[in-house]
Amino acid sequence: MAKEKKDKINYKNLKVNQEELSITKIGEISSVNQSPVFILVLFGLLLAFIFFLPTITNYIKGEDETTSYETPKETPKEEEPLAPEEEIKMYSLSDTLSISLEDKVTLNQFSLTDEALSFQVTNNNQTRFDFDAENYFLELYTEDNTLLDRILLEDVVNRETSLTIIVSLSSTTIENVEKISFVQKETSDYPNVVLEKNESDETILTCTNAIETLTYKFQNEKLYEVEESVSVNSANKDYLTLLNDWKVRSESLNALDGVTSVFVDTGVSFVANTTVDLKTAKIAKNENKYYYSNETLAKVINFEMESRGFSCK
């Protein structure tokens, strides 16, 4: 089949019209007769090719390399279950109650009087049992499990012996107590406390009972100084015993570095004022359990002093 000859432009006979804005005729290309059906078919094939191009491309690359435009769904994070709170084991208070506190440590012979609760502790171990070191608290509840009082236990029971512990209680507690519990606590579990400032703009915690006032001073909620004031008059039933005890204690404390203690006996009353610089003073806990070590947290002092019957603020 003979190929059709394409028309070429003849530049040799080209003449440029010098008239302005006139059309210059370069040459002519002869039009080829084209069928409308052919154009429609060609246009349809082109559209089909464009439409199926992504499918053809994925087929060639293979299914493993198919690009997914779907946004991946986030897998919901499973919430970690909260650790269950340890249930407080309560006992109905009666004279027949017997509690196995720890291995070979038994509590029994519970008795409630008008002023106190007493019970016997039997330690059958080969080592002594220290309530204070184990951080045990006695908690007293009403019939509907309302907490009435909390007492910090500080007694030591020697090995293979029994000891009767007597805990003084308020009249309100004695009238309403029905249940008791013995609970060990970590200092990290103690509630926080809001400290006040005195007239000298010092951050303090003041704890008082019938005869004593202890003022704890803090820097960044850490203890650095203790001031103690004791005042007792002869109307107190234990006056003579307290008089002798505090006279000896004041003299002993005053001899220590970092401690100043003044004792005044008026004949019908006495006053003992003591200041302890805990950064300097070396005081054993058995000398005064109310003098905490340097940098003790305020919440520890507040929680434990209130558990000794003091009112703190």
Image (tube, rainbow, N blue to C red):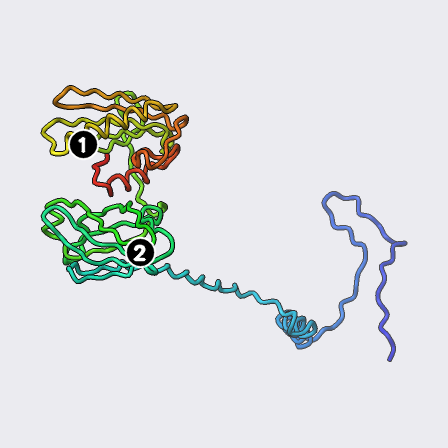
Which x, y percent locates residue 146?
A: 17, 53
Which x, y percent locates residue 121?
A: 26, 54
Q: Name the residue nearer the viewer: 22 or 171.
A: 171
The three-letter code of the residue at mark 2 reads Asn
Residue at mark 1? 241
Crowdedness near tag 2: few (<14), some (14–19) or many (≥20) residues, C-alpha within 10 Å: many
| Residue 43 appears anywhere in the view | no
- In the picture, measured across the screen, residue 2 lies left or right of residue 166, that is right
At horizontal 70% and vertical 73% (from top left) the residue drawn is 60
Is 28 rendered above or below residue 2? above
| Residue 191 appears anywhere in the view | yes
Which residue is the extreme one toward the bottom? 1
Is 48 rendered above or below residue 167? below
- In the picture, measured across the screen, residue 10 lies left or right of residue 313, that is right
Q: Name the residue nearer the viewer: 222 or 242.
A: 242
Q: Marks 2 and 1, Cα distance to the nearest angstrom?
A: 31 Å
Which residue is the extreme one toward the right? 12
Task: Classify the position of the C terminus by image quarter.
Answer: top left
At horizontal 16% and vertical 58% (from top left) the residue drawn is 93
Task: Classify the position of the N terminus by image quarter.
Answer: bottom right
At horizontal 86% and vertical 52% (from top left) the residue drawn is 14
The three-letter code of the residue at mark 1 reads Thr
At horizontal 24% and vertical 55% (from top left) the residue drawn is 181
Which residue is the extreme one toward the front? 160
Q: Earlier in the sequence, mark 2 or mark 1?
A: 2
Q: Name the residue nearer the viewer: 133 or 295.
A: 133
Residue at mark 2? 123
Which x, y percent locates residue 92?
A: 17, 60
Q: Name the residue nearer the viewer: 299 or 276.
A: 276
Q: Secondary structure at mark 2?
A: strand
